[in-house]
Amino acid sequence: MPDSATNIEQYRLPIEALEELGQNVTRLRDQADERASLIDYQGDAADAPRQPPKRSQRELKEQSKLRIVKHLAKEEAHIERYERQLSGKYQKRRYNELTAADITAIQHAVLIQHRFHRDIAEQYQVSVGLVGRIGRKVGTEHIEFKIQKEEKASDDHRRVRAVCFELLERHGAIQSVA
């Protein structure tokens, strides 16, 4: 009987060939696993139960986190819509009811901050169209005129108040305003 050690040595593969063979075997095993999971998922017969392919724990955690984030985003959007519906019912003010400070703030929000007209309209309780007109057309002369008008109105209010207090001090009661 011949020596077994001498017979095996002539058939032994070099290290490079062993590594290549190992890589091929690993690749074939991966392909077989993928094919088996695909057959499990799709089913090879009409009555075979279909199972989803197995996923790693990391993929499952990422999907769970993604599902939670989407759910939270939907809830936030729902809350925002609800708040807008609640705040959407207001009587809109006209241009002549706005103060000079309101007009300059609306202009700043439109021209400098580039905010949405709808948001600005809700904040200042005016129509969206009025916000657009103020952003487009209102210049410094309109604002200066508004300021002068407000100052004149406040002066008139101070005068009327002073006269009313004077009449109250003299007579104790005001008989007529006119």
Image (cartoon, helix red, strand yellow):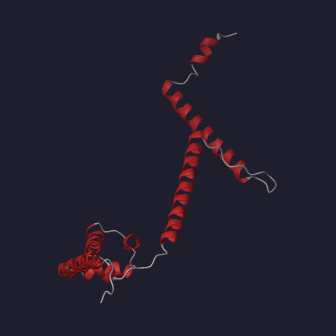
Which quadrant would residue 156 be assigned to in this image? Answer: bottom left
Estimate the x, y position of residue 121 in percent, counting from the top left.
38, 74
98 on left or right of 43: left
Which quadrant would residue 9 be assigned to in this image? Answer: top right
Q: How many marks?
A: 0
Estimate the x, y position of residue 38 in percent, counting from the top left.
67, 49
Estimate the x, y position of residue 97 in percent, counting from the top left.
33, 80
Estimate the x, y position of residue 125 in percent, counting from the top left.
40, 74
Which quadrant would residue 170 be assigned to in this image? Answer: bottom left
110 and 144: which is toward the camera: 144
37 and 75: which is toward the camera: 75
Taking the view exactly as shown, the residue that stands out farthest to the bottom is 178
- Image quarter hosting the C terminus: bottom left
139 and 19: which is toward the camera: 139
Q: Residue at x 56, y 40 (%)?
A: 58
155 and 83: which is toward the camera: 155
Q: Residue at x 55, y 58 (%)?
A: 75
- Image quarter hosting the N terminus: top right
138 on left or right of 45: left
Taking the view exactly as shown, the residue that stands out farthest to the right is 47
Q: In the rendered view, would you say 22 is above or below 114? A: above
Q: In the rendered view, would you say 106 is above or below 27? A: below
Q: Residue at x 82, y 54 (%)?
A: 47
Q: Residue at x 65, y 44 (%)?
A: 54
